[in-house]
Amino acid sequence: MTLPVLPSQARGVRSRWVRWRPQFIILAGDLFAIAFALVTATVRPPSYELLTAVLLLLSLVLWRLYQTRMSLHVLDDLPRLLAATLVAGALAAAVFAVLDRAALSAADQFYLLVLVVAVVAMRTFTYWLIRWRRRRGQLSQPTLILGAGKVARDLGRYMVADGSYGCRLVGYVDSEPALPAAELPAPNLGPTELIATLVHEESIERVIIAFLAVPEMELVPVIQTCDRADVDIYIVPRLFEMTAHYDDSDEIDGIPLQRLHRGPFRSPTWWLKRLIDILVSGTALLLLSPLLGILALTNRLVDGPGIIFRQTRIGIDGVEFEVLKFRSLRPATQEESATNWNVKHDDRLSWFGKFLRRSSLDELPQLWNILRGDMSLVGPRPERPHFVEEFSQQHRRYDARHRVPCGLTGWAQIHGLRGDTSIAERVRYDNYYIQNWSLWLDMKIILRTLTAFMKGSG
């Protein structure tokens, strides 16, 4: 099944602001509660109170209490609200106990009590306000349901009947609908293959997957087409009648919805990846400039003119760019460069070319690719257009590797999948990396790459 590529910027700034308004309303309420508690505190200066306020906001973020949800009720969040507030107060008390060796004063304890009450009260108000505005369509998010069976029908009816869920049902998407169109509360907009196009054209912000006839192996690429879009994806679990409700799940009128892991671009720490790329590549180019000069000079003396080798590779979203390497072998023709898979045992390799390839030092010029944004430090290794086309036909989900920037090293490479190794295994490792991306995973890959490099294993 061939699916269209979804543009990474499907909506403008105004739409994003509208979408995030519920979180801003909740945050404004929390800040008002903190300010109210600070005003009531009689301690001057309010050092403990301010530290508690900062720790409380961090705790609320860590407890996912600013996450967009359809079912929004303060009693559902009350245990976490109390825990976040008390943990923040306890941590602040511990800090001041170490620094000042003093117990909390009566005024500090009163502040903490007022803070708990104020936060719960404001959350009650802001949740009610959001539900009230949703019923009037002011904070509703355009929603698609994948599947057109009984569960999908019921979900749609609940959305239409109760606007407090904040879902404006645009329609259904199903290649083989189980129910006729007359039984659905919204039209069936087309086959499953159109999901990416519909998400873009209808400015969809929520996609709910509710039992399609599509096999799971074909459903995965359908979901992946939404990874670059600013869209939340939920799935109705199998045997949902027996599924317990967890803090990271949602529900519509008793039907549980499991939020799928956000794509890397949706992570709040994704922007740090690019910042780290710039800082590390820029610093490395500066510090390694003597080594780069020595390698370039030796390359010129041993193998003649043409120190830097340029080759077209495929990067994020299938965009071509020129990757830079120290030349280890001069190809006979441009076609040979584009289509020759491996030159590891080529007789034309000089002793220095073999050294560059064995040590991976030929990859160092790619630090410039990273600095200018063609690549990242960590990601799937970029491949040539000829082989991208060939592997895409032979290996399922190969194109899914292009959802993130390609990298100097990657999850597949640290597991020994480099050179003439299994492409199917690389695809599996690369897609695992994308689905489970985190800054710590990047750091782990970099550390293991450096360890392998120091051991001389390339």
Image (spheres, rainbow, N blue to C red):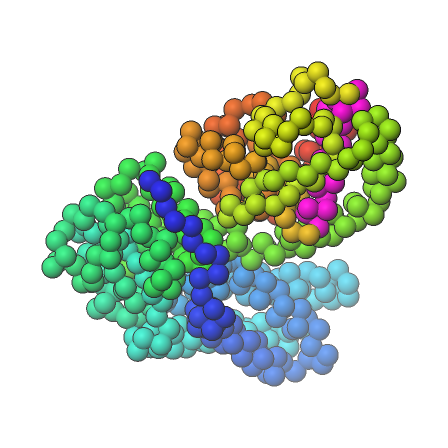
Q: What segment is highlighted magenta in the picture? A: 351-371
- Residue drawn 61% across and 23% down? 342
Quadrant housing residue 330 = top right
The chief SS type of the magenta part is: helix
Point out residue 45 in the picture as x, y percentages from the top left corner.
73, 79
Point out residue 446 in the picture as x, y percentages from the top left corner.
68, 39
296 falls in the magenta region: no
Please state which of residues 53 and 282 is positioned toward the viewer in this rendering.
282
Evaluate whether residue 336 shows in this view.
yes
Residue 89, compared with residue 275, is above or below; it is below
372 horizontally vs 294: left or right: left
Query: How many dots with numbers?
Result: 0
Residue 216, compared with residue 173, is above or below; it is above
Point out residue 285 in the picture as x, y percentages from the top left corner.
79, 46
- Residue drawn 47% across and 35% down? 389
126 horizontally vs 411: left or right: left
Evaluate whether residue 242 shows in this view.
no
Quadrant housing residue 413 = top right
102 horizontally vs 57: left or right: right
365 falls in the magenta region: yes
- Residue drawn 86% across and 39% down? 293
- Residue drawn 58% across and 22% down? 420
305 horizontally vs 52: left or right: right
Point out residue 157 in the picture as x, y percentages from the top left corner.
20, 62
The quarter of the image holding the C terminus is: top right
Please state which of residues 98 and 241 is positioned toward the viewer in this rendering.
241
